[in-house]
Amino acid sequence: MKKALVLSLAILLGIGLFASAQTLGGKWASTITIDPTKTSFADAFGFSSTLQVDYKVGGWIFTSVSTLSDTGWSDQTFSAGGALGAFSFSSVLDLDPAGAFDKWTGTVGLSLGGMSLGSAWTLDGKGLSLTLSGSGSTGLVNFTSIALGFGDPTTTDCDLDWQDVKIGLGFPFACADVTAELYFTCAGFQYATFGVSGLKVDTIPWLSFDASIKFELQTKTLTITPHFNFGNDVCFTTWWDVDTTGDMLSINSIQLVGIGIIDYEISGVSFTGVSYWGAAPKPSILYGTDYWEGYKIATTDTGCCGPFGFDITAYFGAAHASLFDVSEFDANMSLQVSTQFNFGMGLVYKVATGVTKWTLTFTVTW
C-alpha cells in the first residue's frame, strides 16, 4: 500500500513538473506592399501575413505556421521536434490549403560513443526518398560523413531502391591534413576527391592555396584556388580575381575587383561602402543587385517607446543620366513599440522612375 502511495505521489509530482514546463508562444507578422508605378490597384497592392504558434512541453516543440497573401491562404505547415534519450527527432508536414498534400519530411538522429547516426526522409508527389547518414572518429581518421540514398526505383535498376552512397573522410598524410570524398551510384564508382587547404608560400606571406584532385573513371582534374590575406591592420576589405586561363598551375594575372569598408562603427553609427566590378555573386550590400557601388548608413537608438532602428542605402549604376550615376535609394526603419509589438516601414526610390515600393510591417510576438 505504501509503495502504491509513493508511486502515485511520484506520478502526480511528475505530471505537475511536466505541466509547469509548458509554454505557448508565437508570432504574427504582416507586410503591406504598395508599388505606385503599377497602373491597376490589384497589381500595385501586395499583402503577406504569417502566423506562427509554438507549443513547448517536456523539451519538445510543436509549431504551426500559416501563410496568407493577397490571393488568400497560401501555405500551411506543422512541425515537431525534440529528443527522447539519445535520439533526436524532427518532422515537418507541408500542406496546400487548396486541399492537397505537398510533402512530409523528417529526421532521426542518434549520438552515441563518439558516433553520430541519422536518417532523413521526404515523402512527396514523386515518391519516398530516404537518406541514412553517419559520422565518427577512429583516432586520427575522421569519418566526416557517410550518406546512403534511397529513392524512386523508376530511374535506376538498383536493389532496394538504392540510389547512391557518399563517404567523406579526414585524415593526416605526411605534413598535411587531407579531406576526401568517395561517391558511388548503382552504376558503380563515380569519383574520388582529395584536398588540402591553407598551403603557404614562404616568400609570399599574404598568399596561400587550396588544392584538390578529382579522380573519375577516365579523367583526373586538379584544381588550385589561391587566397589572399593582407592582415587586419587595414580597415578596408578587398576582393581579388585570379586569371589562370589555359593552365591552372600558372597565374597569368591578379586583379583587384572590389574594395570596401564593412560595418565600420562611428559614434554608434554603422557605415558600409562597397565598390565592386567583378563577376557575380557580388559581396555585401551589392548582393543580388545590378549596381556596382553602394553606401549604407545604419543606426540603432531609442525612440519614444523602445528601440529604434534606421538604415538608408544609396546605389550607383553605370552610365546613368543622374548626378554621380545615383540610381536607387533604399530606406528602412523599425520601432519596437512594446516587448510584444514591432512596427517597420521601408521605401525604395529609383531615380529613373520614382517610388517603386512602400512597405509597412507589423509584428506581434507572445
Image (tube, rainbow, N blue to C red):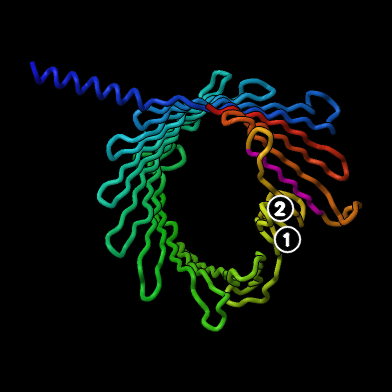
Q: What crowding class fits label 1: few (fewer than 14 Cα within 10 Å), some (14-19), or many (20 or more)?
A: many
Q: What crowding class fits label 2: few (fewer than 14 Cα within 10 Å), some (14-19), or many (20 or more)?
A: many
Q: Is residue 227 left or right of residue 162?
A: right
* Prevailing secondary structure of the magenta residues: strand
Q: Which residue is mark 1?
A: 276
Q: Which residues are magenta?
A: 307-316
Q: Is residue 340 left or right of residue 217?
A: right
Using the numbered discs, state the Cα–Cα distance from disc 1 to disc 2 in whole angstroms. Answer: 8 Å
Residue 239 appears at what percent x and percent y? Answer: 66, 65
Task: Give the amino acid type for the residue marked by disc 2 in the picture.
Answer: Leu
Disc on the earlier residue, 1 or 2: 1
Verify CB contact (< 8 Å) between mark 1 and mark 2.
yes
Residue 331 or 181: which is nearer the viewer? 331
Q: Residue furthest left?
A: 1
Above or below residue 140? Residue 316 is above
Question: Is residue 312 one of those drawn in magenta?
Answer: yes
Q: Secondary structure at mark 2?
A: helix
Residue 153 in view in this figure: no
Q: Which residue is mark 2?
A: 286
The structure residue drawn at horizontal position 34% and vertical position 41%, both measured from the top left corner, is 109
Q: Secondary structure at mark 1?
A: strand
